[in-house]
Amino acid sequence: MELLITNAIVYDPINGIDGEKIDIAVKNGKIVETPELRDAKVLDASGLVAMPGGVDIHAHIAGPKVNKGRLLRPEDHLRVVRGRREGLRPIVGYTIPTTFTTGYWYASMGYTTVMEPATPPLETRHTHEELNDIPIIDKACFPVVDSNWFVLEYLKEGDIDGCAAYLSWLLRSVKGYALKLVSPGSEEAWGWGEGLRGIDDPVPYFEITPREIIRGLHRVNKLLRLPSPIHIHCNDLGSPGNYKVTLDTMRCVEDLAEMDRPSLHIVHIQFNAYGGSGWGDLSSGAPELAKYVNSHSHVTADLGQVLFEDTTTMTADGPWQYVLHRLSGNKWVNHDVEAETGGGIVPYEYRRKSYVNAIQWTIGLEFALLVKDPWKLCLTTDHPNGGPFIEYPRIMTWLLSSKAREATLARINKRARRKSLLGSIDREYTLYELAIVTRAAPARILGLEGKGHLGIGADADISLYRLDPYTTDLSKDYKRVREALRWAAYTIKGGEIVAIDGEALNTSFGKTYWVDVKVPERDEERIKRDLNERFERYYSVKLENYPIEEGDLRFSSPLRIRGEGV
Amino acid sequence: METFTGVTCPFCGCLCDDLEVTVEGGKITKVRNGCAYSLTKYLNYNRDRVAAPMIKEKDKQVAVELPAAIERAARILAEANYPVLYGWSSTSGEAINLGIELAEEVGGAIDNTTSVCHGPTTEALQELGLPGCTLGQVKNRADLIIYWGSNPLQSHLRHISRYTIGAEGRWRKSRDDRTLVVVDVRKTYTARVADYFIQVEPNRDYELITALRMALRHEEIEQDRVAGVPVEDIEELADLMMGCEFGALFYGLGLTMSYGKNRNIDAAISLVRDLNRWTKFVMIPMRGHYNVNGANIVFLWLTGYPFAVDFSHGYPIYAPGATSAVDILSRGESDASLIISSDPAANFPRRAMENLFSNPLIVIDPHRTVTSMKADVVIPSALVGIECEGTAYRMDGVPIKLKGVVKPPKGVLSDEEVLRGILTEVRRLKRGG
């Protein structure tokens, strides 16, 4: 199918296009030169803004943890309900919507690529079953590897090549895309009901520290030439004063980093940007972290902004979820996964009149506004931890409009308002910068070359919004802007129109990305011997039943990579 | 002769995946590593099979071609106002997935056997959550194992040897490294191998758990005995639980289906939650059918709810007690049923059965069942894990792919294929075909 989009005002940061009226030509699912079109359908996009399809680098949308969240919260499914329609399955849920709802809603917002950022390898077959049932969007998942026994043992022995070979096997076996670290080492400690605080607390029995794990996996990531850096949920998440641990984490790989290239992605940094010594004097560590990020090029981050919402928190960080359960008194699911990782789920409501919650809200926005280079930042809520993804447009307008921020600031806890410097920051994002943090930067950090831009050869994933930047005051008319960003006028995925005016049109399915990395043969042979020897001692399943076949993915899209030394 | 390794057994919620099955001339001749149930299932899977699709004509089931049976089944569902689609716990996740789509399409209620086994676990979990883990975690770490209202030596035969006191784990090498406690109303087989056996009076589990929680909190229990158990024993058990490094509570229908039901599970979850203030403690329900957990899991990602989902309004409604199969049937509200991989006639209450049989009834099953003998349409299907592949979820949520080791009888399709046929036909009929 051919499509010519005319008269749209285009924001395409990767190609340096900042609000220009240019035509976009689409053929066979890709962006092409206009003359290549023969029999194109013309879409007149006068008065619309065009951007590359949105890319969400971090949203818990599928897998055992998300599904346990659904189980835990029947009350959540009553918040939005809509019956089936021709070609569309029912819509159910809000913070943990069903798989079909998830796909429809992302498309309705103009998002076309989403990453599930934490899957326990042993249960990743489940994650893929759910990803298979999320319509429209392209997707991938990141296996959690920081408490994996093989990883801990290889790293303890200083065997980086062995660890790399093992992880290439793991990524291929579970069809994963990037390496995820969750509070490094702490899920193993949580297996005994313990936690780790800083990055120098040793993991019980394994006698290895988070610092060594982070450095080791940083080197493995480079050896494997993975498209994306390691994604790290820092230690001590959620605790007052933890911004120091985040600084330690960023610093601990400084000497390993090639300074011109990002090699460490800090996920949902807001949750790890707390100053103070307790809940009573919780303060913002955002300025310190932003200062560090501004002066170093090896780090990128996503936001993990909180919204004032009743939401569902879920993470592989088992010990933190237990703390949150004890703090809030709310119901608590825990799920530890043998030899690999853990997980917990706790419903939580961020209340604007709560000092702590209000401070959390200001921290995220402070960080987003204090980081000078938007290429280092991605907009997320750590869905659904900070709030459901469907509310992203609210965050977008807080970034675009100081008036929108003031309106919320006026209603939050007074002490938090007085203490925060948010009110004194007058920076407002441009639409170009917004396109960076919601498309271009995440695509670039993920190494997805066909995503996040509209250059020739890119995937024809395009979102059009009913927004005329020449006549709209983004700051003043923020409510209108928010509506426009919430309900994309058109969402185009792989060259097909998949949503109009915020309504998904069909139940088509996108691709699942994963990496297939070749490592030196001798290392591969060696780790096969190790697996044969140790796997069945560690696990409760047979080694041969662990890998997932490519045929188990609805549309498999492997990225073939030659690791270093091949 | 061919030997398949790493075969996963489609019997109970243990999903043992280490079977070795030998096939000679298209027949299974040998099974290694399996338990008695597993062996019986693999070596006798071909007995009592439904020979051909059947349709009832003048009160007699007559053999027909498969397309005719699928067409009749689709017509029954398409014409029904409020069909019930029940079973699902002994088939593949892929089939369950299509079952939900079919329920949406026909505006029916879909329910799995959870509503008659671990439904109370679900309801309690929705109130409180549940601290759990995978079975390998227990194998590697647990030094205290409790079976409560569960008798694995007669229900989940290899549970003990694979995951608990008989298993060798990273930090627990032998039987001596673990303590086994059994709480039950009678001295079961499992109780005989236990280090501690606590005999609770029938239907008084809730009281015993509450007393245990009191003992944990250093509160004094005034009675001499609670639920038939001497207070000293309760206090000793409480100390044992607090003092372990990693405790695991496995519980069965003795707790979920005795007096108190979900309140018992509420109490058990609260107990385990309390214990996490002192040590590491987890709990795992002993799920029965090999894929009953998978039924819950697939239902959840597609509808938000684990069982008893009603699509009569086009969107899912979940209200166990109202939208569960037994209740809909007992109230006489449904006007057709599809039963798959389950035999409700063998265990549902009489009133529910009367309605099941007085309305058009479709059964999809590899075997002849009490239910299928009275059905209007019977469609034989291939056995998942023996004759065709499919995904199942172990009691702890670990997903495992089941293999097919022999071919199904000629012309027999998998549940998944049969359901896809019915769904396609229903859609054709509804579009005025």
Image (cartoon, coloured by chain):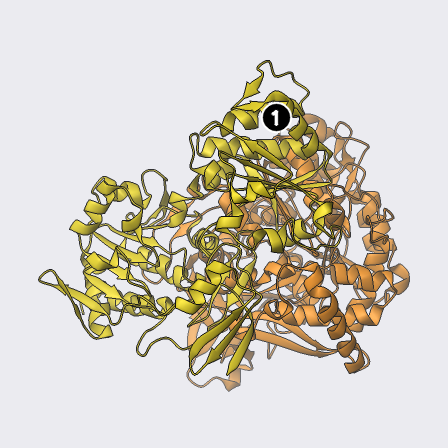
Indicate the position of residue A282 as horizontal and vertical percent values: 76, 32
Point out the image quarter for the N terminus of chain A.
Answer: bottom left
Residue at horizontal 53 percent and vertical 49 percent from the top: B153
Point out the image quarter for the C terminus of chain A.
Answer: bottom right
Q: Is A32 rendered above or below residue B20?
A: below
Per the rendering, the colour in which chain B appears is yellow
**Circle 1: residue type:** Arg
Residue farthest left in this picture:
B58
Question: Which chain did the renderer colour orange?
Answer: A
* Kind of element beneath mark 1: helix
Read off the residue under disc 1. B213
Residue farthest top in this picture:
B222
Indicate the position of residue A47 as horizontal and vertical percent values: 49, 61
Indicate the position of residue A493 as horizontal and vertical percent values: 50, 69
Camera-nearest residue between B236 and B338: B236
Q: Is residue A387 left or right of residue A295?
A: left
Indicate the position of residue A169 as horizontal and vertical percent values: 70, 72
Residue A69 can be seen in this image? yes
Residue at horizontal 41 percent and vertical 55 percent from the top: B89
Q: Is residue B418 left or right of residue A289?
A: left
Residue B274 lies in quadrant: top right
